[in-house]
């Protein structure tokens, strides 16, 4: 007999998937032990106690799932309590949809049901996806079962999907269900539901739900409560279809409720409701281009066109390269084609399946328009910049952005005003650019009478190291100073954020939509008017001192501010796509009138006329996944990251040598209103609070591991200890840190392996205590710097005078500097020692190209930038193996006319254009 443990409260929603799977798996194990006779409550009382706790947990959370469901839990407990574990085991064995830990390794736990030859679910044959439908209404057991039976009777063998219905009685239960259960794809609201939940909701869950709830709805009329719940559900999971089933005259409701509901039905319309449920999921399941490519590959065709590899023609009959077909498979070769007809489409001028796929992606990511890019976000960034910037336009950009932005400015001829992010000198990387710095720079342009030249702001969100901006606040405050600014948010590492209710609000598209709603609110205009009065001299009408503008949280004039927002995303980095699959999302109210033609030309300039169809198909598939299971996958990836952080903090040997850096380490106090060091570890409500209030937050799925106590530098730790020693791949290191990133493909097994490897490494360090691990000498400088002793990160110095405008704004003509290096004898190479001597002597040494160490992965020097002592000291301390634009034999490439009295190497202006520039891929 199981012990009847008190029902636990339902805690952090992000961990529910793991706790539930573990509880079901343990019950399966325990019931097998009882049924075998090897254990019993009397011989092993601890087993009975553990069974009781597992039942208590499932009794708390299972009401929010249709299957296995709370009824199965009750029946299992009945069998165990009656001493009949054999019947319990038989019941478990007959369940095909148990959320076991093994089944959730690389997914959300959703199942597929096999079909027999007649298309009947539950037998052998091809599989079809199953989802859950949430019905919100106060029904007794008989009514609920009757509703489920009526809906099940509508199923047809030809249905593409199957579903199960779960009924919850209240507003709060509905929100808990959509939070906990990622298998829910549709919600049906009926007027009879109550407001309060009777389930044991924990403090974290109730605190998280508070902003999504309205206490006034508890006593409100049913229609208002229904509308409030529909809005709340869409706010948490906008991908869900929401339906209204009413028992009154629905004709009077239809016209006024179309925005909140996909459709409205009478209670008797079971067949139409059934078909609508399937249709709603089918719309998200649709992959126009992927499907067209599959159909094309199945047709016979004779190729009298380019691409000998098309349909495997040059591979299949070859005795020398048939291993390519063996490795990649026939379908890949059948799908290789140059055709744009036969159901396919042209990426450069889409009107068919690619156009439809891009429209679906725009819907999924909350954009007005979306464009697919098949050669990475490097190209996506260049497209957006070239579409917006003309020679002489000023762009404000964080200096530590990806190299593609810097090259885009060269191509566009823009004048670049570099912004410095706050430095994290102790860990040798940067944070993000404070909004005060952005405002100060804009105000400098206003003071200089040059604000009209500033066209664009470009920022990276989130940064490589996981620092996340409040995009809405940044745009709001900047638009208060320059109302027609265009914003490009490089979200190369943030595409997944759309699928999480907390992360989503800090994405560019969500922020643009939020500002659009705010600008339409009369109260917002009144706030602006009151602030504008305070920020302008009452007599002259001139703006008051800049410091007052910097101190205030600025509110733009909604009557003149324009919302022009672009986001570039590396779909392949954080979602499902083949390498180089990226998207450009557009939320620009002036796109049609001001940018459509220039965008088209920029897109034509940078997009291949032979795009990779496999990449395009993978983008289409990746979008489908975002809409159908993105929520559960992103929830899982964040939770797994938290589990790693907790393991490092709790294991005595791990915490001796390693430490996961927290918000307190990575974000200065002045940018945080909240005090939680790792908000998600403390609960979803703490995460929500920090992401709503703090200027900067940390992406929980990124773990920056401080390894300084090992005495090993980051690059050596990455290559020698992790990759070579244990096959663990990481993306980035600094002098004394290693960045681990979980993603939607991360499994519990891989997390366990990482922890196991870290423990083994720590044991090795423990065994070799006292061994000296010297710092390494780097070819860019003299001597070595111990781990953790990296010099301060160098801010952007300045452009040489001939490349900058002669005022305090400090923007530079990077294009002029870039092309000046093409001139014969214009540049020379100088060793680190020679450059240091020249700088010490007071000479102005100017870089002729980009110098980009990996890590940190952004240009330390750009063409036309003055080289300073701080830059040289930082470069000398680097231990990275890869520095693009720096010649290990010859040194720095600089403009020859700025350095005298040193020998230097011969100029390379005649050796070929672009010498010494960064060539790294995105």
Image (cartoon, rainbow, N blue to C red):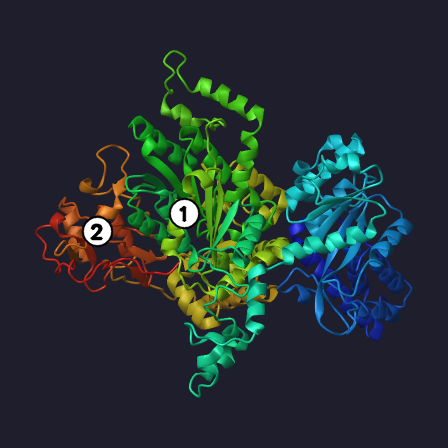
Query: Seen in the image, is 310 located left or right of residue 775?
Result: right
Front residue of 519 and 196? 519
Q: Position of residue 764 (x, y in %)?
A: 47, 69
Query: Seen in the image, is 565 located left or right of residue 856?
Result: right
In this view, 509 is above or below 274: above
Report, in whole angstroms, how far the alpha carbon at label 1 lies from the one at label 2.
Answer: 25 Å
Q: Write down the residue under mark 1.
A: 599
Disc 2 element: helix
Q: Quadrant of residue 246?
A: top right
Front residue of 910 and 655? 910
In this view, 502 is above or below 773: above
> In this rendering, does residue 165 appear at all?
yes
Front residue of 311 and 445? 311
User: Which of marks 2 and 1 precedes in the sequence?
Assistant: 1
In this view, 155 is above or below 259: below
Q: Position of residue 608 (x, y in %)?
A: 39, 60
Q: Residue at the spot x=71%, y=46% of the render?
A: 242
Q: Residue at the spot x=21%, y=42% of the render?
A: 803
Q: Write down the residue under mark 2.
A: 819
Q: Position of residue 532 (x, y in %)?
A: 45, 21
Q: Position of residue 630 (x, y in %)?
A: 61, 55
């Amino acid at each position: 007999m199981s012990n009847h443990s008190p029902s636990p409260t339902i805690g952090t929603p992000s961990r529910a998937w793991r706790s539930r799977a573990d509880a079901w798996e343990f019950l399966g194990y325990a019931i097998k032990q009882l049924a075998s006779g090897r254990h019993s409550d009397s011989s092993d009382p601890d087993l009975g106690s553990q069974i009781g706790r597992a039942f208590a947990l499932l009794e708390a959370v299972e009401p929010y799932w249709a299957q296995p469901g709370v009824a199965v839990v009750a029946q299992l407990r009945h069998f165990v309590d009656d001493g009949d574990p054999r019947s319990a085991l038989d019941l478990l064995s007959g369940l095909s949809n148990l959320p076991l830990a093994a089944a959730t390794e690389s997914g959300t736990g959703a199942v597929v049901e096999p079909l027999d030859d007649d298309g009947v679910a539950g037998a052998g044959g091809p599989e079809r996806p199953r989802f859950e439908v949430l019905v919100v209404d106060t029904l007794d057991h008989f009514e609920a079962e009757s509703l489920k039976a009526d809906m099940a009777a509508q199923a047809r063998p030809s249905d593409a999907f199957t579903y199960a219905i779960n009924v919850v009685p209240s507003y709060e239960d509905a929100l808990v269900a959509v939070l906990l259960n990622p298998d829910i794809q549709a919600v049906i609201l009926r007027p009879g539901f109550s407001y309060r939940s009777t389930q044991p909701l924990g403090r974290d869950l109730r605190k998280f739900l508070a902003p999504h709830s309205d206490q006034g709805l508890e006593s409100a009329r049913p229609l208002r409560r229904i509308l409030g719940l529909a809005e709340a559900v869409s706010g948490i999971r906008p991908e869900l279809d929401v339906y209204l089933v009413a028992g009154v005259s629905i004709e009077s409701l239809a016209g006024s409720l179309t925005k909140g509901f996909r459709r409205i039905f009478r209670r008797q319309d079971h067949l139409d409701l059934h078909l609508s449920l399937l249709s709603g999921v089918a719309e998200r399941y649709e992959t126009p281009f992927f499907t067209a490519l599959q159909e094309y590959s199945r047709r016979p065709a004779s190729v009298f066109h380019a691409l000998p590899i098309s349909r495997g023609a040059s591979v299949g009959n070859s005795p020398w390269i048939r291993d390519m077909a063996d490795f990649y498979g026939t379908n890949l070769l059948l799908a290789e084609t140059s055709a744009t007809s036969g159901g396919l489409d042209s990426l450069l001028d889409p009107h068919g399946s690619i156009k439809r796929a891009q429209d679906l992606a725009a819907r999924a990511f909350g954009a007005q328009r979306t464009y697919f890019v098949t050669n990475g976000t490097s190209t996506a960034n260049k497209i957006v910049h070239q579409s917006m910037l003309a020679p002489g336009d000023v762009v404000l950009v964080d200096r530590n952005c990806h190299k593609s932005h810097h090259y885009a400015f060269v191509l566009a001829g823009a004048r670049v005003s570099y912004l410095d992010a706050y430095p994290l000198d102790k860990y040798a990387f940067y944070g993000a650019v404070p909004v005060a710095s952005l405002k100060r720079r804009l105000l400098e342009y206003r003071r200089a009478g040059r604000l009209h030249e500033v066209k664009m702001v470009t920022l990276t969100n989130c940064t490589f190291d996981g620092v996340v901006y409040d995009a809405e606040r940044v745009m709001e405050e900047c638009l208060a100073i320059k109302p027609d600014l265009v914003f490009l948010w490089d979200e190369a590492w943030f595409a997944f954020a759309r699928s999480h209710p907390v992360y989503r609000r800090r994405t560019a598209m969500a922020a643009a939509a939020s500002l659009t709603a705010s600008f339409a609110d009369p109260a917002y205009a009144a706030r602006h008017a009151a602030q504008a009065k305070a920020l302008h001299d009452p007599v002259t009408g001139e703006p008051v001192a800049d410091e007052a503008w910097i101190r205030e949280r600025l509110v733009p004039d909604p009557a003149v501010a324009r919302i022009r927002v672009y986001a570039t995303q590396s779909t392949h980095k954080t979602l499902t796509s083949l390498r180089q699959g990226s998207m450009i999302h557009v939320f620009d109210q002036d796109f049609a009138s001001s940018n459509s033609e220039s965008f088209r030309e920029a897109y034509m300039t940078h997009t291949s006329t032979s795009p990779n169809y496999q990449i395009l198909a993978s983008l289409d598939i990746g979008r489908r996944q975002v809409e159908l299971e993105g929520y559960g996958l992103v929830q899982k990836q964040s939770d797994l990251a938290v589990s790693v952080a907790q393991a490092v903090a709790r294991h005595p040997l791990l915490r001796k040598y390693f430490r996961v850096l927290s918000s307190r380490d990575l974000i200065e106090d002045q940018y945080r209103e909240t005090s939680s060091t790792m908000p998600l570890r403390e609960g979803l409500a703490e995460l929500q609070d920090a992401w709503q209030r703090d200027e900067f937050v940390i992406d929980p799925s990124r773990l920056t591991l401080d390894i300084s106590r090992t005495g090993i530098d980051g690059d050596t730790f990455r290559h020698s200890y992790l990759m070579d020693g244990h096959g663990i791949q990481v993306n980035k290191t600094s002098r004394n840190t290693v960045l681990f990133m979980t993603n939607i493909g991360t499994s519990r097994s891989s997390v366990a392996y990482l922890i196991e490897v870290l423990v083994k490494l720590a044991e090795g360090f423990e065994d070799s205590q006292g061994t000296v691990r010297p710092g390494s000498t780097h070819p860019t400088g003299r001597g070595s710097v111990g781990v953790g002793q990296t010099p301060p990160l160098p801010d952007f110095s300045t452009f040489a005078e001939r490349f900058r405008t002669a005022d305090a704004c400090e923007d530079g003509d990077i294009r002029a500097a870039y092309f000046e290096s093409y001139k014969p004898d214009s540049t020379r190479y100088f060793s680190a020692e020679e450059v240091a001597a020249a700088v010490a002597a007071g000479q102005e040494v100017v870089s002729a190209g980009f110098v980009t160490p990996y890590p940190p992965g952004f240009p330390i020097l750009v063409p036309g930038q003055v080289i300073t002592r701080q830059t040289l000291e930082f470069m000398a301390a680097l231990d990275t193996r890869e520095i693009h634009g720096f010649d290990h034999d010859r040194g720095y490439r600089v403009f020859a006319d700025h350095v005298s009295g040193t020998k230097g190497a011969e100029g390379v202006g005649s050796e070929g254009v672009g010498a010494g520039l960064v060539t790294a891929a995105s």
